[in-house]
Amino acid sequence: MRRLRRAIALHVRRAVEWPGYRPGEHMASCISHDGRLCAGRRDHRYDHVVAEILDLLAACDMKMASSAAGLGVSTANLVAFLRNDPTLWQLVNRLRLAAGHRTLR
């Protein structure tokens, strides 16, 4: 079940209204009071958070700054969150290339 949830989070997109986006229940509970994403890969909410981040990135044409602003976190924090998961990092870079942006470092 864990692998299935992970695959769905990584590959199934849901349309997100941008602008006007509001973080969902799982996402909101994973943003600390100081505005940082705080869900680790072993957290039961992690796949929901990953899916919502990817949905928002897709709605923002894979632009990190716009996505981070929508989440209420810094761009550096969003990039650091993505970097902590090699599979997610590679996927985001592939999607950014397809959207005409450079890869993240």
Image (cartoon, rainbow, N blue to C red):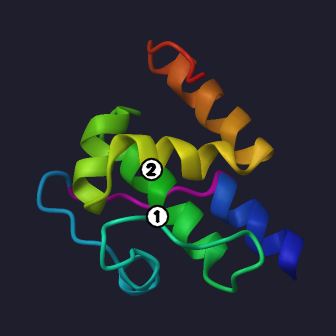
User: Residue under circle 1?
Assistant: 52
Question: Which residue sits at x=44%, y=50%?
Answer: 77
Element type where label 1 sits in the image:
helix
The numbered mark, 1 or 2, whose residue comes first in the sequence reads: 1
Please give left or right for residue 65 compared with residue 14 in the image: left
Looking at this view, name the residue that lies furthest to the left: 20
Choose between 47 and 30: the one closer to the eye: 30
Name the image quarter holding residue 16: bottom left
Please give left or right for residue 11 compared with residue 24 in the image: right
Between the C-alphas of marks 1 and 2, the distance is 16 Å
Please give left or right for residue 38 compared with residue 84 in the image: left
Specify the segment rendered in magenta: 11-17
Element type where label 2 sits in the image:
helix
Q: Split into 4 quadrants, where in the image is the C terminus?
A: top right
Residue kind at label 2, given as amino acid type? Asn
Question: Which residue sits at x=32%, y=57%?
Answer: 73
User: Residue under circle 2?
Assistant: 77
Task: Indicate whether residue 101 is drawn in magenta.
Answer: no
Q: Position of residue 35 (x, y in %)?
A: 31, 67
Choose between 97 and 76: the one closer to the eye: 76
Give the crowd class for mark 1: few <14, some 14-19, many >=20 residues within 10 Å.
many
Q: Is residue 7 above or below residue 41?
A: above
Question: Which residue sits at x=57%, y=53%?
Answer: 81
Q: Position of residue 85 (x, y in %)?
A: 74, 50
Choose between 70 and 11: the one closer to the eye: 70
Question: Which residue sits at x=64%, y=73%?
Answer: 46
